[in-house]
Amino acid sequence: MLMEERLHDLQEKIAQAALRAGRDPGEITLCAATKTQSDDTIRAAIAAGLRVCGENRVQELCAHLEADAYAGAQQVHFIGHLQTNKVNKVVGRVELIHSVDSLHLLQAIDKQAAKLGIVQDILLQVNIGGEESKGGVAPEGLEALANEACAMEHVRLRGLMAIPPVAHEPGANTHYFVKMRQLFVDMRTKIAHNESSMDCLSMGMSGDYEDAIAQGATLVRVGTAVFGPRPAAGQV
Ligand SMILES: *Cc1c(COP(=O)(O)O)cnc(C)c1O
């Protein structure tokens, strides 16, 4: 299948999943995970209607920005693990950073955004599967980190993100998505002064985006289902 067909097919499946859940398809944003893809592949996806690109690695983000590969996209997001010493390459260059999971990182982002005189939109990543290999704050630590984020002048907390364990069968991650939705609703209630801007629940990938949408995802991060299988060397 051509990428253009895959993209349209995916957008249709996202819309159908939303309708099945009684939701408006317009509530759900597709963020294409562009890791390992070339400038030309990204350009082709944007020409085919892709609006939001999600980068995993700082180095790839910089290279694609340099090459102007995102021209015509509405937004670029950073979705991968971010090291504190690299925030200056990301803050102010992407609309949303999905992967904030420590106070240290939060402070570094706030500081860099202050330097640029901007407010950086962020999500807090939650390690919902409790996996040692994955980033994310533990659910028990979320409220404290959210409060810190809300107290910062140059950071705007927009919601939550999660990467649950790899699902080997349909529905396997539903309970994680349910938990994430509860954490999201909880956080919006507890941090009421910021509720209107807390509108993003980033969860669901190629294997489970329909389940994630059924449980309330407002943004799905999809790579393989847009671009086809990634070369092995580039896998995360
Ligand atoms: C690669 C990646 C995705 C998409 O993965 P697919 O299974 O290819 O859809 C989503 N989120 C993050 C953070 C990723 O690194």
Image (cartoon, grey):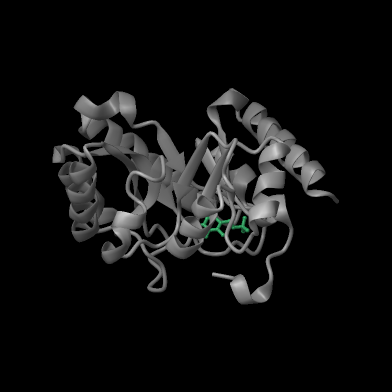
Q: Which residue is depicted at the point 51% across and 61% down? A: 60
Extreme residue in the bottom direction: 233
x, y (%) of residue 95?
A: 41, 40
**147 horizontally vs 166: left or right:** left
Q: In this view, does 124 lie above or below 216?
A: below
Q: Which residue is depicted at the point 21% across and 34% down? A: 190
- Image quadrant holding the C terminus, namely bottom right
Extreme residue in the front direction: 67
What is the total number of numbered labels drawn onto the structure image?
0
x, y (%) of residue 189?
A: 26, 30
Q: Can residue 221 be seen in this view?
A: yes
37 or 115, nearer to the observer: 115
171 or 221, nearer to the observer: 221
Extreme residue in the right direction: 1
x, y (%) of residue 209?
A: 61, 46
178 or 67, nearer to the observer: 67
Q: In which quarter of the image is ligand 1?
A: bottom right
Q: Which residue is depicted at the point 44% across and 40% down? A: 201
**48 horizontally vs 211: left or right:** right
x, y (%) of residue 46?
A: 66, 40
Q: Which residue is depicted at the point 59% across and 23% down? A: 24
The quarter of the displayed image where residue 18 is located = top right
Q: Is residue 118 above or below residue 109?
A: above
Q: Is residue 48 above or below residue 25?
A: below
The quarter of the displayed image where residue 118 is located = top left
